[in-house]
Image (spheres, grey):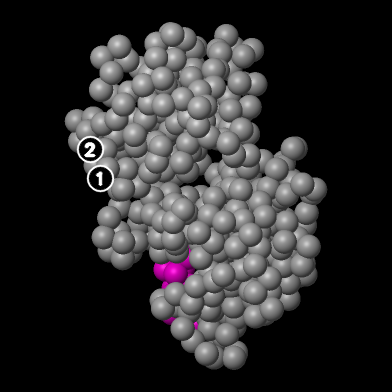
Amino acid sequence: MSTPPSPAGTGRTDESAVRIGALVPLTRPGWVGAGQHLLAGLELAVREVNDAGGIAGRPLELVVRDTAADPQRAVAAVDELARLGVAALAGEYHSVVARSAAARADALGLPFLCSSAVLDALTEQPTEWVARLAPPQSRGWQTYADFLLGAGHRRIAVAVQPSVYWASGTRVLRDYLAPRGGTVVELDTQELDLAAVCDELVGHRATALLLLVGHPEPAVSIVKSVRHDQRLAELLIGAPAGQPELAEWAALLGDDGAGVPFLRYLPERLSPLGARVETALREHLGEAPSFVAFEGYDTVAVLADLLRDHGADRARIAESWPRVAVEGTRGQIQFSRTPGISVWQWTCPPIQVVDRDPAEPDLFRILHAG
């Protein structure tokens, strides 16, 4: 049910170490690329904490477990990490997995700083044990809807798969667009083949298709099918969940993957800290770091600050979420209670709508900021 600890930053047997448990999707069907970037950010920050003297002279240790996008596997990992004595949990990319992990962390009284999952209802009931860096889905996807409206799109189609996450995103879009003259029609990719999806888009006279489906499939096949249907030459393809962010998207789709707007959580300009971290991450990853890597780094930056003040005392860490004031790679990180959000939430993470430039697919264009 769990992978061995990652070799970087987690191989110590020093009993004096302060441990953080890390939940990361590192195997299929998890989004492995996102997991690798998340882990790279977590590990870089741990190395820097230890290079600076650790936690009051004690080494910081990252104990990594692969969730593989499986909620049950994540719950088992939380139980195991709690038994191992970690002071807190970090990470996770997939929202449905993070929701299960958050519920278990809450039940066990284990602080969990969720790096990247966005579901508004990360827990069923308000909890003091869980905080989050990524913006809630409602805020991010409303920003995306503003981009669509500003670009003149009112007839929106969404290609969907069954999932709490995709259903929540569809609801956010529909509720936000309807009062502003927009419509959302759902195309069930389990019932419609690729040709039928294209026929439905033509029949509904949609001007934009949003991919609320898994990566790489069926997202990649849908993009290829739509791009090569002459009836849909003017159709905008969008991916609010961020599939085009990582290099795998460009490798699989080439030019077809350009011009697909998606959400990412970066500022227009990185701070000096962010620029330094970007350089280190790029060297480690061999490619440009995604926003997910910065989320990983910022997660450890926050937890290290709390651990310096409170050591491994789980209750005191959780009590301190509202007093956090940490300079992260993407701005000052502080947590507050947000209406409708059940966890402690970073108040104002940056949000952008970007795409890969059709002229140079390795470059990103900022289309909208929220």
Q: Is residue 288 left or right of residue 146?
A: left
Residue at 77%, 57% in the rendered image: 128
Mark linked to residue 254? 2
Q: Residues within 10 Å of mark 1 (few under 14, many from 20)?
A: few
| Alpha carbons under labels 1 and 2: distance apart | 6 Å
Query: In the image, residue 226 lies at what x, y percent?
Result: 32, 23
Q: Is residue 79 above or below residue 281?
A: below
Residue 281 shown in magenta: no
In the figure, residue 137 lies in which quadrant? top right
Total marks drawn? 2
On the question of residue 229 being in view, the answer is yes
| Residue 327 as seen in the image, left or right of residue 222 | right
* Nearer to me, 285 or 236: 236
Q: Which residue is mark 1?
A: 251
Measured from the top left, where is residue 158 in percent x and y?
50, 24
- Marking on residue 190: none
Q: Position of residue 67 (x, y in %)?
A: 54, 61
Q: Mark 1 is on which residue type?
A: Ala
**Contact between labelled residues 2 and 1, with CB atoms less than 8 Å apart:** yes
Give the image quarter of residue 131: bottom right
The image quadrant of residue 113 is: bottom right
Amino acid type of the residue tagged 2 in the rendering? Gly
User: Which span of residues is magenta-colored?
Assistant: 41-53
| Circle 2 Cα neighbour tier, 10 Å, few/some/many (<14 / 14–19 / ≥20) | few
Quadrant placement of the N terminus: bottom right
Look at the numbered disc 2 and give the secondary structure of its residue: helix
Which of the pair 307/107 is nearer the observer?
Answer: 107
Residue for point 59% across, 39% down:
163
**Main secondary structure type of the part rendered in magenta:** helix
